[in-house]
Image (cartoon, rainbow, N blue to C red):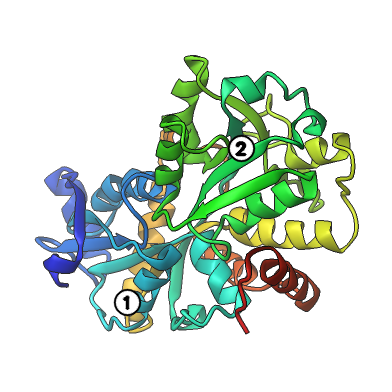
Amino acid sequence: MSKSTLVQGAIFAVVASFGTGAAYAEGHAVNLEGKTVDFVIPFSESGGSARWANFYAPLLSEALPGNPTVVVRYRPGAGSTEGANWFQEQTTDDGTLVFGTSGSTQFPYLLGDPRVRYEYNDWQPVLASGTGGVVYLPPDLGAKFDGDFNDLKDEAFLYGSQGATTLDLVPLLAFKMLGLQVDPVFGIEGRGDGRLMFERGEANIDYQTSSAYLKSVVPLVEQGLAVPAFTYGSLDENGLIVRDPTFPDIPSFKEVCEATDGCETSGVEWDAFKAFFISGFAAQKMVYLPGSASQAVVDTYTQAFKDIIARPDFAALAAEELGVYPQLTAAGAVSASDQATQVSAESKAFVLDWLKEAYGVTLQ
């Protein structure tokens, strides 16, 4: 891997005891002792994907046989499609490369974005992480929010966006459904850059995925510098959108939509929102091995993630860093990957028409 094209993140090396590491290695065909695993994400180092990857990196270092050094590397560009295109071309087969995706990687693939030269079906999923997202406002506008956006429909909103076909599709569609006048500023490299725009006063509405919200926005809320408006919600066992369990005191978008004049929670627009919400958040972040990786490598990573999730302290660690969401491995990760990379023809057609009309984006 060319160091000149990568921005190296923090290096995590967690060394288990010799006895534990040796016993683990003996039970696996793959031993990564003395090696470096590159955990590449196609975003900048300031957003939710970076926080997610940096959460798992030291745990992977401890769980993988041989306790390799796990390095989080950042390869942002074109709303994550540049990094995904790069990963598509990799032929590493020894377990020293994994790739982390987000909904912003899935959406261009789903919509037929011509920049996409990657194929999810060629990759091998070993972890799927659900997450959520929180939309928030500055205090002056937050004072006008009382569970609906009826008093904010004439406001001129600015929103820092990675692009209309990235994960930002979900908030942009939500803003449309609420009848808000939102002017997106396209071209930021990660949601963390959108938050920085908000902090500098260059944007007056923003959203962050749960992990980034917990770390970087909750302190703003505590200082009176930001006011949460809604989460995207979470799916219950019946497939209905309910309050996000990580943020039970913040209303879901469905609740706010129902309370806002002109916003409907049925029909083709709602169906499209829900379809892309499921693809973008229910299994938003996933870890893949290249298609060239051997079955032994896939099995090794699957077992490592199983062991991580089975740790007695994992639930508490994850709740604090990532939120309360499913972490799926093995067949669960494969199923989640399949669901996250498929939407109905009707929802796709609606979104393509809306993107063309609202932003002049033509993909096909």
Residue 312 visible from this viewpoint: no
Seen at 60% across and 38% down, the residue is 134
Q: Element under label 2?
A: strand
Judged by depth in the image, the label closer to the viewer, 1 or 2, is 2
Query: Label 2 neighbourhood size at 10 Å, few (<14), some (14-19), many (20+)?
Result: some
Mark 1, residue position: 86
**Residue 153 horizontal/vertical position (percent):** 77, 37
Seen at 47% across and 39% down, the residue is 211
Real-space Cα separation, disc 1 to disc 2, in angstroms = 31 Å
Quarter of the figure with the N terminus = bottom left
**Depth order, front residue of 34/342:** 342
- Sequence-first tag of 1 and 2: 1
* Kind of residue at badge 1: Trp
- Judge from the rendering whether residue 11 lies leftward or rightward of residue 205; answer left or right: left
**Residue 212 horizontal/vertical position (percent):** 45, 38
- Is the residue 6 above or below the residue 131 in the image? below
- Is the residue 185 above or below the residue 320 in the image? below
**Residue 276 horizontal/vertical position (percent):** 68, 61
- Is the residue 343 above or below the residue 146 in the image? below
Mark 2, residue position: 135
Q: Residue furthest left?
A: 34
**Depth order, front residue of 200/193:** 200
* Kind of residue at badge 2: Val
**Residue 66 horizontal/vertical position (percent):** 17, 58
- Is the residue 45 above or below the residue 199 in the image? below
Residue 179 visible from this viewpoint: yes
